[in-house]
Amino acid sequence: MRRMLRHFALGACALGATLAAAAGAQAQDLYGTLAKIDAANEIVIGHRETSIPFSWVGSDGGAPQGYSVDLCLRIAEAVKEELGKPDLAVRFVPVTPQTRIPLLANGTIDIECGSTTNNLTRQQQVAYLPVTFITGTKLLVKTDAGIETLDDLEGKRIALAQGTTNERVIKAAIEAGGLDIDVLNVKDHAEGFLALETDRVDAYSTDHILLYGLITNARDPESYAVVGDFLSYDPYALMVRRDDSAFQLLGTKVLADLFRTGEIEEIYAEWFQPFPTNENVSEPPTDLLQAAWRLNALPE
């Protein structure tokens, strides 16, 4: 009997050591963003405040909402499962075009869920998950301004959000065309639209889908129009930190599953067909966006 108890005790110790070793190995396997989240017991999502319908905060000051936010929350659920922490906290931190990359790079946020273009210049500092939307630069003007193209802004003023691809594109086009257009730098879309609304500028320029979002939230939507040809190609994607393949793979798996099953179309329709801020505005997915979804619907 004593020998049996001794064998049982030794077996229990061995089992405990094995489980402890396994737990230790799992902890050691975590690195980068997943290790940071695990240690902090929270995932921090960077969000925009006025990028309708991707990521914004309503007038009631509630939780961030939108297409990009929904996708990030799906990734947060996958992180909880990966770490075995169903009660993992999700915290939101607002970002702007100027702060989104620094706050991601320095660890303040773990993923950026807004309306950010994936380009090669930014990939020197951050990494991206698969494309979730495709848009391009256009102009927002008042309907009675007589402005149809960038050339029509000769001798006038345009507002541009600092740190955006649109700022670079418009300034390059102004220089290339030898145009006399004054630029007012603003911090975000809300400030840019306010400048247009109060006649401090004659146009505001950003991605066409965000301009429609600003119109839907205006006091008098009929007073504004999105005009001009597309001046850029802007594929949106969620930003993650560079050199962190484990977290990037986890996010890619989540999006690939949504693309593969077609669930992405349901999520998209909830935010774009119609816009939640104006039921009279609807933006169906373009053929190009649907092709991007199919191309990124990677098999398991």
Image: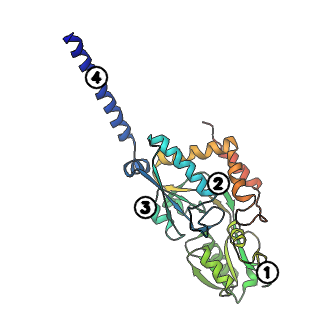
Q: Quadrant of residue 289?
A: bottom right
Taking 5 as reference, is 70 left or right?
A: right
Q: In the image, is residue 220 above or below residue 41?
A: below
Residue at screen point 64% across, 57% down:
67
From the viewer's perspective, is the residue at label 1 or at label 4 nearer? 4
Q: In the image, is residue 167 above or below residue 46?
A: below
Task: Tell me if mark 1 has few (under 14), some (14-19) or many (20+) residues whose alpha carbon lies within 10 angstroms of its own.
Answer: some
From the viewer's perspective, is the residue at label 1 or at label 2 nearer? 1
Label 3 and label 1: CA atoms lie apart by 41 Å
Q: Residue 12's mark?
A: 4
Mark before the other along the chain sequence, 2 or 3: 3
User: What x and y, as percent, mark residue 114?
Assistant: 58, 62
Label 1 and label 2: CA atoms lie apart by 31 Å
Mark before the other along the chain sequence, 1 or 4: 4
Residue type at numbered disc 2: Thr
Residue at screen point 46% across, 59% down:
109
In depth, the one of 262 and 176 nearer the eye is 262
Q: Secondary structure at mark 1?
A: loop
Q: Residue 132's mark?
A: 2
Q: Residue 108's mark?
A: 3
Q: Quadrant of the C terminus?
A: top right
Mark before the other along the chain sequence, 3 or 1: 3
Label 4 and label 2: CA atoms lie apart by 50 Å
Mark 4 and 2 residues: CB-CB less than 8 Å, in contact?
no
Q: Residue furthest bottom?
A: 155
Q: Secondary structure at mark 2?
A: loop
Taking 218 as reference, is 123 left or right?
A: left
In depth, the one of 9 and 266 nearer the eye is 9
Q: In the image, is residue 143 above or below residue 37?
A: below
User: What x and y, as percent, mark residue 167?
Assistant: 61, 74
Residue at screen point 58% across, 81% down:
185
